[in-house]
Image (cartoon, rainbow, N blue to C red):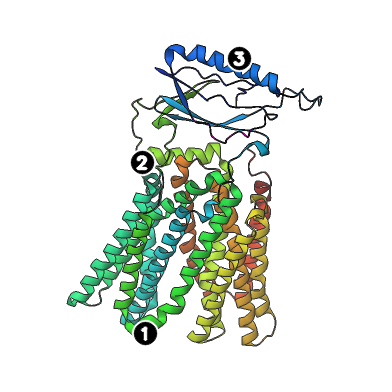
Amino acid sequence: MNRLFTPAHSLHVPYISPLPHRCLVPPLLPLSPNFMFPIPHSFPICRLPHSIAPASAFLLRIIPTALIALSRPPPLQSPTFQSSSNLDCFITSIHTVGRYERIIVTSPHPHLNSSPAPHSLLTSRNFILLVAGQGLSLFANTMLRFAMSMWVLDKTGSVSTFASMLATAVVPTILLSPFGGVLADRISRRTIMVALDALSGTFIVLAAVWFAAGNGFSMVAVSALMVSLSVLSAFETPTVQAALPQLLRDSGKTTMRRGMAIVNQVQQLTSLLPSFAGGVLYAAFGIRMMLIISITGFYATAILECFLRLAPPRRAAHDGAATTNASTITTDEDAPTAMPTPIEDIKEALHFLARKQPNILKLMLFATAVNFFVNGNSSVGFTYMVRATLGFNANVYGISEGIVGIAGVAGAFITGALASKLIIERFPVACYAIAVCVLPCAVAFAAPFNDWTRLALIVASFCGMIIAASFTTIIAIPAIQMRTPEALTGKVMAMVSSLSICAMPLGQMAYGWAYDHVSPLWIALATAAAIAALTFRARSLFAHFDAL
């Protein structure tokens, strides 16, 4: 930032080089901290013809200085106050609008700034609409998947059929997510979210019409619906993950973490509700009511998102050239530029990760490796240990899973309360906590406990893991978002999503094989040791994360 004002006890109006046909200067205002009247936060703009701009600027410099020098008390003798490092005011931002510039000036002395403190963006209409929309969308999606799994189980008698179908549907998400990130960085993110949620509701309507038209149950139709929704998810996930930092980036890292914690709270709640209500609704009303709920949820989300106010995403430097010097800011808005291809956009994001921010790439790979162990163990191990090893029925399993889900909600609220302390340097602590929380599963099978005691230890273990995992999410995701330029946020978050999704089926297959051949005791010990070893190996990464 260039110094455009003189030291304390003198007043100058900043000189602004004349733009074509007009010169904009702030009106006569007291800029000294000794003057009696407060300085407003934002100066209005006055416009002067180009021909008289230099003379006007000269008069505005000399006359106020003489007048205030006569009315000002003698200068203080403090050498610190008279130091040339003390400025009366600072230009905090300059906005170019067409041929004119709007200058925002604030005083370094708090009592001179009369504008009120801005309200928290976490209570703004935009943030509330975004969170509510994503909660409804996730609820509709979870309810639909629950309904489809129950329906396929009733018709085929095999839940593995639906699981295989979901695993197949993951492939389009992995392949198309980077292109979804490219789209999120090119056009309005609100438009993308509205269109995708409306399309999701429409696809379910078409499937419901097919089922109700006399065709009945069809695995082909169910598979087509799941794959279609997976394709839409590949474009929506990076868009939503780019919209959140667009809203909160300017408020700082703490606000970003708190916002992410609120989103996590809503996600945990909306994922938990279908587990409790889905079974009752399906038993009472069947698949038709479940489809109606999902359709309503997606269309309601699209309507809510219509009221979002999101500016078009800022493009990278190749979409517009800007030049700045000490007194002028000009923007070449009319320079012809070629729109890069999607592949070039993806290459740009990869170059950013590999060359400019390699630590973000290392964090993504580290999180993917940890997710391999955590997700694989939780999605396969919990079910296997409770149902197969201990032999509990579906009711006990459902209650146990509900307790773990409640722990996830509690973890989201805990991370929200501690958001200001969840800095990237504390990421290894959360990972070590995950490793420690795996150990009760090993204790459950190492000691001669009865089945109920073992169940209590297993549930406690997974409750601890999901709470610790909430901390890693709230630390890692905002850390990536805050260090990524807005023009690349969609693409980078799409790569994060793709890596995370890749880890899930690989972990499930690996742990599925392990639980068929190895005792749960050794699996738990190996999982804890692997997570702890990875964290110890990466400790220097988080200690010097911003060092390039």
Question: Residue 498: image x %, image y %?
Answer: 45, 54
Mark 1 lies on a secondary structure that is: helix
Query: Looking at the figure, which quarter contains the N terminus?
Result: top right
Q: Is residue 43 magenta?
A: yes
Outermost left residue? 214
Mark 3 lies on a secondary structure that is: helix
Mark 2 lies on a secondary structure that is: helix
Query: Looking at the figure, which quarter contains the C terminus?
Result: top right
Instruction: State whether residue 174 appears in this view.
Output: yes
- Going from N to C along the chain, the mark reached first, 2 or 3, is 3
How many discs mark residues in the rendered view?
3
Badge 2 is on which residue? 342
Q: Residues within 10 Å of mark 2 (few under 14, many from 20)?
A: some
Question: Residue 348: image x %, image y %?
Answer: 44, 37
- Going from N to C along the chain, the mark reached first, 3 or 1, is 3
Q: In the rendered view, does 374 fall on the left or right side of 348? A: right
Q: Quadrant of residue 115?
A: top right
Separation (CA) of disc 3 from disc 1: 84 Å
Q: Nearer the viewer, residue 199 or 542?
A: 199
Q: Is residue 515 magenta?
A: no
| Camera-nearest label, 3 or 1 | 3
Question: Residue 255: image x %, image y %?
Answer: 58, 51
Inspect the image, locate mark 3, and give the three-letter code of the amino acid beneath it. Ile
Q: Residues within 10 Å of mark 1 (few under 14, many from 20)?
A: few
Badge 3 is on which residue? 62
Badge 1 is on which residue? 283
Q: Nearer the viewer, residue 100 or 454?
A: 100
Q: Nearer the viewer, residue 253 or 68?
A: 68
Q: Quadrant of residue 279?
A: bottom left
Q: Which residues are magenta?
A: 35-44
Inspect the image, locate mark 2, and give the three-letter code of the amino acid beneath it. Pro
Separation (CA) of disc 2 from disc 3: 56 Å
